Image (spheres, coloured by chain):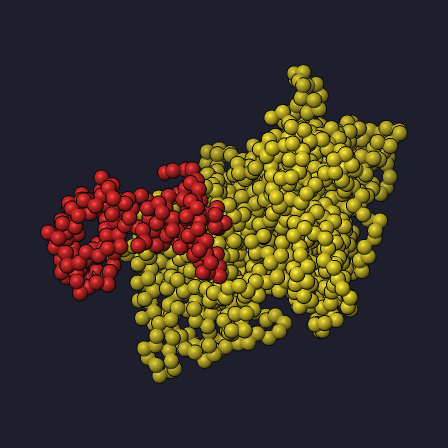
Amino acid sequence: MLKAGNAQAMATITIDNRQYEVDDGQNLLSACLSLKKNLPYFCWHPALGSVGACRQCAVVLFKDADDQRGTLVMSCMTPVKDGAIYSIDAPTAQDFRAGIIENLMTNHPHDCPVCEEGGECHLQDMTLMSGHTQRRFQGRKRTHNNQYLGPFINHEMNRCITCYRCVRFYRDHAGGTDLQALGRNHQVYFGRQEDGLLDNGFSGNLVEVCPTGVFTDKTYSRHYVRKWDLQTAPSVCEHCAVGCNTAPGARRDGKGDPRQLRRVTNLFHRQINGYFLCDRGRFGYEYANSAARIYTPQAALTQPLIQTTAGSAKVHQSLSPADAVARLAVTIAQMRSGNRRVIGIGSSRSSLENNFALQTLVGREHFYAGLDERSLALLKLVDRIQRDPRVHSPGTPEIERADMVIVLGEDIADTAPRIALAVRQAARSAQIARAGELKIPAWQDDSVRQLTGIRTPLLVASAERTDLDDIASCRVRAAPEQMVALADVLAQALTAESGEIHAPDIAGLDTGEFTALVEQLKQARHPVIVSGCGLQSQELLQAAARLAFAVAGHKEANHRQTDSREARAALYLACPEANSLGLAQLCDARQNLNQLHRERQSEHTPQPTTLLVMEADLYRQLPASVADQLCAGVDEIIQLEIVHNRTSARADLILPAAATPEYEGTLVNSGGLAQRHYAVYEGSGWIQASWRWLADAAAASGELAGAELSGDEETHARLQSLARWRHVTQLSVALAESYPELAPLAELGPDWDQTIEGQKTARQPHRYSGRTAIQAERQVAEYKPLPDDDAPMAFSMEGIQFACQSPLQANNWAPGWNSNQAIHCYQPKPGAARLGHSSGQPLARKAVVFHSDSAAGDAARPTADPSDGFRILPLYRMFGSGELSNYAGAIASVTEEPFAVFHPQDLELLSLTAGQQIAITESGDRWQLLAKVSDTIPRHCIGVSTGFTQMASIPGAYIEREQIAPGDA
Amino acid sequence: MERITPELSTEEIRDIDAEAGHYPHKSAVLLEALRIVQQHRGWVSDGSLQALASYLKCPIAELEALATYYQLIFREPVGKHVIYCCNSVSCWMLGGDGLQAHLQNRLQISPGESSRDGLFTLLETPCLGDCDRAPVMMVGREMYRQLSRETLDAMLSELRARDGQQPMSDHREQ
Ligand code: SF4
Ligand code: SF4
Ligand code: FES
Ligand code: FES
């Protein structure tokens, strides 16, 4: 195994008479696990550290070679010491561990057969590992009542072994306040004060953190199968732009239920999600199973069956995939012969390959991002800023270690949740550093936390109360331009030789606080600046960039960083969608929906035109009136889509598109990292990846008589290459050749036919059951496993089973380790990058120094309305602002209704009352919202829920004059 | 259980604020605040917990964690007289368990329960530090020492006789 850069101090230790060299500074448990020793433990967790609570990890420590008895120590609490002698196998240690587990098990119900942890249970594994196979205890077991914890998590307290991991994660790591250890002694209870939804956005991790079946995934319960009956593949979360790695699990029910996706679990990625996902990412998967899912091609009836008043919504009827392809082929043939214009609308939530296929079909000049002008401009700006050599995008470990964090305007807890969790850890970096000075290692969790009153400086400037407020050392609630002013003054203070710097005029930020901020920023060696597209302000992004540049300059001048990477400033800019930055590479800023709308409006000689919309809802991007005009101005709308939406309602032809876990593709996250997700299962019905529909139709169009005869050469060449693509990796390679930024795509993963020692990677584990019987209801013979044309992976049990041996193996499973704790078997050491895992490729963007151009002002930003002086601030919610996750049942059930938040004085001024329904209208659109009051929203601003279903995702983008009237509820 | 948030009384707030002055961190006053509320109300209801949480601006679950950790914070209504029966070794050697059985029989309750007339609650407790005068019981803040069945019966009668005076006087300081 290779050692990274700077040499890590090593210690030589002896375990059971064998010598090993291990990293110094770690605890003995972590060292033993790195050596792949089977040493049982419960309360220790690689991300939570040691507290020595469970006593399960006991080993014997000998004074010296002559010491025959030794003393029992808890390995998780014992730092490895050079020259020390330990024993895992010593009878005293074994007996002790057996006694501990036996004691823990006295209260544990024997309910593995009905427990959803069964088969992937750390407690089962450790019980067996400790040799406790026979229960001697005859007494009564302690029992508890369970609580209702909301739609995501089951609670079964009888299974608890009191390891305290749940509260250490939920409270200490994620900042939750509603889960506690209650009671004491024999009766400790982990729960809420009363029944109710766990309100922390990372609650889903309890399912993986709890080593027993106390907390299990309730959405999985509804269609539960054992871990060994799931097939899996590495995937990337599609619910925001952070790009967390996931291991979705799927299984057919054998009875033809199209809903195959069963759950999502974490897939360790050191630079991004580590051990934890957010709840949108974990529970959002249900969209793929939702009632709105499209499984078969559908065509609009030319004659409506009944005269309805449904307006422009069409009535659809299924048609065969062959007919659907033929219909699309006709359109393409007309395009080839120059008789039709086809406009492709791409998607920031779909893969680069899908977008590229669409672009290849329609030609670059007819390809538009499925984004409004402002959203695309923001992405292009992010892209330009990130190209500047003075900044880099920090990964999660770097954010966690930051010695100062400045969050400018972005509500990361709702738009990039995993990053917010990282920032929460950064708030403790000062404490950990202080502990280091006192020679307390960071993993000594309880001791480190005793050092109270030491906090990393954390500035949170936001439009509204945020979930990071509790850890912020300085909170500023302000409108975007005030944040711009704040960032600029900070930047100035850093660069200015001398001279007085005045605090910007922001309510709540006094001079003392501001001076402290400046001082902290000057002292910080590893500050991280976080901002993003959320407030939809280019000026804010630019200000964040200017501040980052100033930090870089300051670092270079003052800290004399030798490493050029070190001298760069860490700037994390959150984008909205899983492939926002990928899409931005494929088009220029003008290729947006508003531009398209304008072009269509000004067209004088109408020509037959098709809108080919791929995985984008025009009505989410544009006010309905504009989207309506766009749709009405063409004679055909064809949509490739996952779930029905307002655009598909108007489409003449709908083709069922694969959801992220159903196909292979590449997504670029907010940090500019290209990552590949693989098909976990083959989509049901006629679902296939969008690019395959396009390739099929391109091929079919070539066969249509006469198609070759007319039209231009270049179009034919494009369509021919599209028609020839069989494997998604061919598209990746073509992308790499067409766009220099995307060159790394060629290196991203194995080609479809590139096996490892002649073997493919198995999606199903060895123990997968029912293989010969699962389809018996429909066919007695065993089905042949589906072939995979995109990756060297099998939809079966054949092939590589172990994660280390293939970058494509996502199954977290090793002999003796059936739970997700098995991950350490695939790491050189707990917490380190997974062995053999492809961690993605950064885009090869050319370094260009960024100059903020004043011309790139916020053209479309809603300005203060002259009539009433109010402006809209977009607000986000983890549950509610995600286009796809809004289709997930459990998430939808806890999503609040769309709202507008007012400052109390403004509410009064407008004679509104909280709780009232109000309406906001905007160029013809009218949204009914719940009026809410909050004294944390700046005056003269209205915070409006953004991205909620049935609203354009950017209310206010086009508001010329919003009228707020008491709505008719 | 009562659902409405009963406001903290002025006296309770005064007492809590006085305590808060002694600590650098707000979190340190939570336990004292629970004790104060109990002192005024005899026990800590869900509503009282909510009132405290909103006054102290702390998560209600944190208060619950404290309240359920400390045995002497009552999350259920208790009788006017809370009898703590020592069940540690000295008292046991001198017949404490027999006495407890007698008491349970007299009151028809088990440890953790209250008598139907609402007068008595029986709790077990470890050593009360009065071993030289074992067996002992504590009622409210008052010790009853070297108990026998007879003196125990006398104790009950005395407590019954006291009824009608200050309610909950047992939980009040001084
Ligand atoms: S609920 Fe689970 S994580 Fe929490 S203490 Fe019990 S066993 Fe440990
Ligand atoms: S932070 Fe984003 S990418 Fe990560 S799990 Fe949550 S929604 Fe998915
Ligand atoms: S893992 Fe070491 S004591 Fe729990
Ligand atoms: S044992 Fe009862 S007072 Fe000590």
Q: Position of residue A707 (x, y in %)?
A: 81, 34
Residue at 31%, 47% (x, y): give it: A143
Give the quadrant of the C terminus of chain A: top right
Q: Is residue A342 above or below residue A517?
A: above
Q: Residue furthest bottom?
A: A66
Q: Residue furthest top?
A: A307
Q: Position of residue A155 (x, y in %)?
A: 41, 45
Tell me the red chain: B
Q: Position of residue A560 (x, y in %)?
A: 72, 73
Q: Is residue A244 above or below residue A454?
A: above
Q: Colour of chain A?
A: yellow
- Viewer-closest of B59 and A611: B59
Q: Residue furthest right?
A: A604
- A260 relative to B166 in the view: left or right: right
Quarter of the image holding residue A390?
Answer: bottom right
- Viewer-closest of B171 and B161: B161
Q: Is residue A708 in sight in this rendering?
A: yes
Give the quadrant of the N terminus of chain A: bottom right
Q: Position of residue A513 (x, y in %)?
A: 65, 59
